[in-house]
Each structure stands twice: as C-alpha cells, then as structure tokens.
C-alpha cells in the first residue's frame, strides 16, 4: 500500500501534549498520510486544557471530554486507549498517530502494530524508550519547532569604578538606554553515532554497493524509530551524509526526478 494514501487517526493526549505546536504536529503527520480522524482527550473543565480551546476548531480537532473522577489518576489514558481500539476494529484507517510522551501508550502501540497497521508517535525527548520503540516512527517535539531564542542584555563598560560613582543621574539614564540586546540561540545538539548510519547503509546497499537515500532512511527508522536528522542539526538525511567524510552523495536522475544515492568513498 502506498503510504501516502494512508488514512491516519491522530489521537492526542491533551494532558500530555503541547498545544502551541499542533500545527507542526499535523504537518508531520501529513508526510505519511491523511489525518482523517483528529481527536483530543482531556478534562475540559480544568484550567490546564485552556490552551487547547482556542485552536481545536482551527485544526478541525474533535474534543473528547473525560472527567477525572479520582485525584491523582489520569482517566485520559484509558479513554484514549479504548477509543483507539474501537477505531482499530472498525478498520476505518490504515494508521495511527499517538501524540503523547506517556509510557502508558506502549501497549497500545504494540497492539496496533500486531494488527499490521502503521503507528507513529510524537512526544518529547523524555519519552520512555519502550514507547518510542513500540512505534514504527517516533518524532520528537523538539525537532518540530525552531530553537527558542533568549534575549541577553549587555551593558556598555564604564571607564572605571570611580567614574561610575561620579556619574550623574542623566548620564546613568542615557547609559541604560544604550544597553545592547544580544540574541543568543540555545541549541543542544547530541553527538551522532555513526555506527547506526553504517549499519543502515550496509543493509540498504545494492550490488553496486550504493543505496538510495530514501532506502537508508527507511532502514534507519527500522533500527531506531526515533532517528531524525533534525536531532543532529541537519534539515534532511542528504545533508547528514554530506557531513560524514566516508560517504559521498551521487545525484541520480530518473524520469526527470532526482533520487539521490549514497556510497562509500574510494
């Protein structure tokens, strides 16, 4: 089946997901199919769901009410799991996207895969490994947003301590107005484990000892569902390979379309 024709059920744990990146989440899902079912679960009587109220209609997301009957217990998990099983047995979709960082959905992801359906997850980098590995694809929220920019205020240095003491009030005011705002981007890029790249390349090569970038990408996802070039500061897999000295990218044109190949340098 062509994965671009997937009908995908997007189920969002409203207690555990980020409302501010819903647009990016749906765009990520669209890479794999059509989000035909869009539901978000939570107790809409609580203040913590307020951030979702203004945007669910903008993105055609159906809110599902689930009251928290017991203090300290999250009833959203069970409601979302039960709903997912109903959708699964209805066979109205070919895939699921579970938006949460909660390990409670590990069993659900496994169950969906056992039925032969596509399952992806979207959550924070703190998501437990068990849930990540239970999905075919897992995308970290941190890779969907532009790094946050922090403003730092830097004062112009004074001549010396004595002069600083003798500065008049008008001069002090002027000095404050001349403070320079410096934007500093906070980005933490983890070190790339090249061994996983080598393994994916090895199982993807053809008789000419070269492989299509797309094929290597699929192999990487099979080895590690959360593998994403964006985690390492690269826009795509081609850029990542270009940064590794041992590999070379070969532009390959087929029927007017470019399908890049990668091979080892000789």
Image: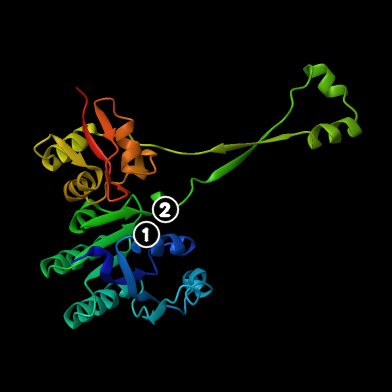
SS under mark 2 = loop
> Is residue 106 among the parts visible in the rendering?
yes
Q: Is residue 173 left or right of residue 195?
A: right
Residue under numbered circle 1: 28
Bin the neighbour count of mark 1 within 10 Å (Cα to Cα): few under 14, some 14-19, many 20 and up.
Answer: some
- Residue 15, compared with residue 263, is above or below; it is below
Image quarter for residue 17? bottom left
SS type, badge 1: helix
| Disc 2 + disc 1, Cβ < 8 Å | yes
What mark, if any, has residue 86 been given in the picture?
none
Q: In this view, does 243 lie above or below 149?
A: above
Mark 2 closeness class: few <14, some 14–19, many ≥20 residues within 10 Å? some
Q: Nearer the viewer, mark 2 or mark 1?
A: 1
Residue 16 is situated, as x and y percent measured from the top left of the image, at 37, 64
Q: Mark 2 points at which residue?
A: 144
The residue lying at 24 percent from left, 54 percent from top is: 132
Identify the residue at horizontal 28%, vertical 71% (top origin).
8
Whether residue 72 is visible here, answered yes or no, is no
In primary-sequence order, the first of circles 2 and 1 is 1
Quadrant of the rendering where the C terminus is positioned? top left
Screen quadrant of the N terminus? bottom left
In the rendering, at what x and y percent does residue 111 appear?
14, 68
Whole-angstrom CA distance, mark 2 to mark 1, is 8 Å
Task: Name the residue furthest front.
Answer: 255
Which residue is depicted at the point 32% across and 36% down? 240
| Residue furthest left in the image | 207
Q: Where is residue 123 in the image (x, y as percent from the top left)?
A: 34, 57
Question: Percent x, y for residue 256?
Answer: 32, 49
Total numbered labels: 2
Residue 100 is drawn in which quadrant?
bottom left
């Amino acid at each position: 089946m062509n994965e671009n024709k997937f009908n995908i059920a997007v189920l969002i744990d409203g207690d555990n997901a980020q409302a501010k990146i819903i647009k990016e989440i749906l765009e990520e899902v669209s890479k794999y199919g059509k989000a035909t079912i869009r539901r978000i679960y939570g107790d809409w009587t609580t203040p913590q769901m307020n951030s979702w109220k203004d945007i669910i209609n903008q993105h055609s997301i159906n809110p599902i009410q689930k009251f928290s009957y017991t203090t300290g217990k999250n009833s959203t998990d069970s409601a979302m799991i039960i709903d997912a099983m109903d959708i699964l047995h209805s066979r109205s979709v070919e895939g699921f996207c579970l938006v949460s960082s909660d390990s409670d959905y590990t069993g659900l992801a496994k169950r969906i895969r056992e039925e032969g359906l596509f399952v992806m997850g979207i959550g924070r980098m703190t998501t437990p490994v068990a849930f990540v590995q239970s999905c075919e694809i897992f995308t970290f929220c941190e890779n969907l947003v532009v790094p946050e920019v922090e403003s730092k205020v830097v004062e112009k240095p004074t001549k010396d301590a004595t002069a600083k003491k003798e500065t008049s009030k008008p001069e002090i005011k002027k000095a404050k107005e001349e403070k320079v705002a410096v934007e500093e981007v906070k980005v933490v890029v983890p070190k790339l484990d090249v061994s996983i790249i080598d393994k994916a390349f090895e199982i993807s090569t053809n008789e000419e000892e070269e492989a299509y970038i797309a094929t290597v990408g699929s192999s990487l996802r099979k080895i590690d569902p959360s593998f994403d070039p964006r985690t390492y500061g690269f826009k795509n897999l081609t850029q990542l390979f270009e940064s590794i000295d041992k590999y070379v990218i070969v532009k390959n044109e087929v029927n007017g379309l470019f399908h890049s190949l990668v091979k080892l340098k000789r």
